[in-house]
Image: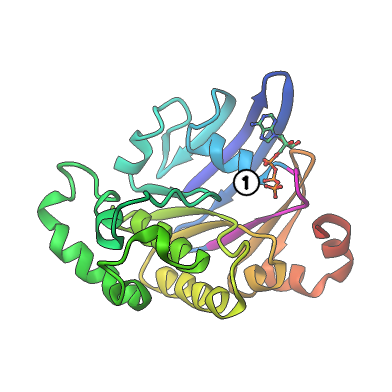
Amino acid sequence: MLEVDGLDAWYDRSHVVQGLRFEVQRGEIVTLMGRNGAGKTSTLKAIMGLLAKRGGSVRFDGQEILALPAHARYHRGLAYVPEERRIVPGLTVLENLRLGLIAGKDRSREKERIDTIAKTFPRLAERMDQEGTSMSGGEQQMLAIARAMMSSPRMILLDEPSEGIMPLLVHEMFVLFEQLKRDGTTILLVEQNVERALGISDRAYILDQGQIAHQGEASDLLADREIQERYCAV
Ligand SMILES: Nc1ncnc2c1ncn2[C@@H]1O[C@H](COP(=O)(O)OP(=O)(O)OP(=O)(O)O)[C@@H](O)[C@H]1O
């Protein structure tokens, strides 16, 4: 579903993503792992068209998307939840959710989408009229994910969703990812919480200095302490 081939990205002259090649098949959960600064966030941003200097090929459903403007990916069914959640201050949970609808495409189905999202995210359903930024960090992360799901994406990229969140909500969040997968959403996950991430993933790639250092089945990587310690210690 997503084929990344020879992906490069730079900040000025700093070459932070160096010729990455990886793929995510339809229906999979795939994790990108690696130490701080390995290039995980930059990889997601390059895929989403958010880094000006980028090169190589990214195909989504067989079509080249790397040169498209960032918003065009949402129209094709690829959504992204950045590390900073960007909940809009002064807006309620419901109003933040509405921002996730793509103008025209989703507007006619707004009520249906909100009802579906409320069922999937019961914690948000109870708080629809509360100001989004007044919720806990974990709840705001849930809202950011729910908002991205409003456009019914076929694939979602998630950047460190569990960061700084209390364990109970982290658990809920990973249960949710498994449910999204069952409902047909393909997921590319960047996570420092290696055990949790591998626990729900099909496969994983380990990044080191902008390159893929290792790849494998999630269950094999979960059992491989040496690899985890070498590449993933924070
Ligand atoms: N806005 C920026 N300007 C310049 N360099 C940057 C910028 N953002 C990131 N970098 C550098 O790019 C490299 C890759 O960073 P990136 O954030 O992609 O790594 P990461 O694996 O996601 O790490 P983390 O887990 O800390 O977010 C690092 O060396 C980082 O310092």
**From the viewer's perspective, is residue 196 above or below residue 80?**
below
Is residue 32 highlighted in magenta? yes
Q: How far across and how far down the image is residue 201, in percent? A: 59, 68
* Res. 148 image quadrant: bottom left
Q: Quadrant of ligand 1?
A: top right
User: How many numbered discs, if any?
Assistant: 1
Work out whether residue 73 or residue 148 is closer to the camera in this orientation and state it.
148
Q: How far across and how far down the image is residue 202, in percent? A: 59, 67
**From the viewer's perspective, is residue 89 above or below residue 53?**
below
Q: How far across and how far down the image is residue 71, in percent? A: 35, 35
The type of residue carrying mark 1 is Phe
Work out whether residue 95 or residue 43 is closer to the camera in this orientation and state it.
95
Label 1 SS: strand
Q: Which residue is rendered at x = 58% and y = 27% of the image?
A: 56
Is residue 223 highlighted in magenta? no
Q: Which residue is mark 1?
A: 22
* Res. 131 image quadrant: bottom left
Q: How far across and how far down the image is residue 45, in percent? A: 55, 38
Q: Which residue is rendered at x = 54% and y = 63% of the image?
A: 29
Boundaries of the magenta span: 29-38
Q: For this view, does 106 lie left or right of residue 148? A: left
Q: For this view, does 212 lie left or right of residue 167? A: right
Dot 1: few (<14), some (14–19), or many (≥20) neighbours within 10 Å?
some
Q: Which residue is rendered at x = 74% and y = 38% of the image?
A: 210
